[in-house]
Image (tube, rainbow, N blue to C red):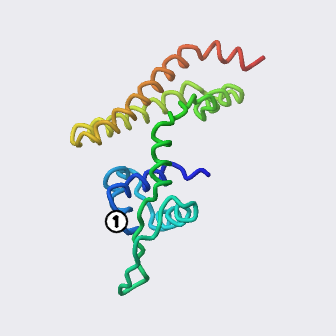
Amino acid sequence: MSIGHIGHTLLGLLESGPRHGYDLKRAFDEKFGHDRPLHYGQVYSTMSRLLKNGLVEVDGIEAGGGPERKRYAITEAGITDVDQWLATPEKPEPYLQSTLYTKVVLALLTHRDAADILDTQRAEHLRSMRILTDRKRKGDLADQLICDHALFHLEADLRWLELTAARLDKLREAVAR
């Protein structure tokens, strides 16, 4: 049963006490959803799956002006599941099927200018880095850590772009065979 990182995050948020779906969405967006807030439908479909799997239970139902509002509470099985998820390391993404690499090789195969592709991508990476650096400078600690993570990945990409640009002639020969 895979509930994904959103399901585990919502479970973890429930450890501080029972909450309605609206409250869970707000807490998720506040702590983790700066760039990608959750949709309400995603919250409720995830909660439905967690309920079906016994990881949460309905702690109460309130009738309001609209539909009933369910308050969810995490179960012992849910706490165990969060413990296991947190203790499991994430698999590093090796990026062995890079779209950018594919574009460079395809450009070479079709006699287009791969150096232009690399230059355009470099400019886009630098633009993203400026935006992230500005956000990091103005942000709180959470924002700074998230931006650092993204910036380090962009820096690695830039190193790859430079290395590939320096090896374009050799790559052109290799793909022509």
Left or right side of 136 for 64: right
As drawn, 132 above or below 46? above
User: Residue pushed farthest bottom?
Assistant: 65
Quadrant in the picture for residue 19: bottom left
Query: Quadrant location of the C terminus?
Result: top right
Residue 3 x, y percent position in the rendering: 55, 53
User: Residue pushed farthest right?
Assistant: 177
Q: How crowded is the residue under tag 1: few (<14 C-alpha within 10 Å), some, or many (20+)?
A: some
Q: What's the residue type where badge 1 is placed?
A: Asp
Residue 77 x, y percent position in the rendering: 50, 54
Q: Residue at x 47, y 53 (%)?
A: 6
The number of numbered discs placed on residues in the rendered structure image is 1
**Which residue lies under the disc numbered 1?**
23
Left or right side of 176 for 97: left
Which is more toward the observer, 143 or 9?
Answer: 9
Quadrant in the picture for residue 13: bottom left
Which is more toward the observer, 92 or 77?
Answer: 77
- Badge 1 element: helix
As drawn, 177 above or below 54? above
Residue 29 x, y percent position in the rendering: 35, 56
Quadrant in the picture for residue 102: top right
Residue 84 x, y percent position in the rendering: 50, 42
As drawn, 5 above or below 66? above
Which is more toward the observer, 155 or 23?
Answer: 23
Which is more toward the observer, 91 or 158?
Answer: 91
Q: Residue at x 41, y 67 (%)?
A: 21
Left or right side of 170 for 37: left
Q: Residue at x 33, y 58 (%)?
A: 27
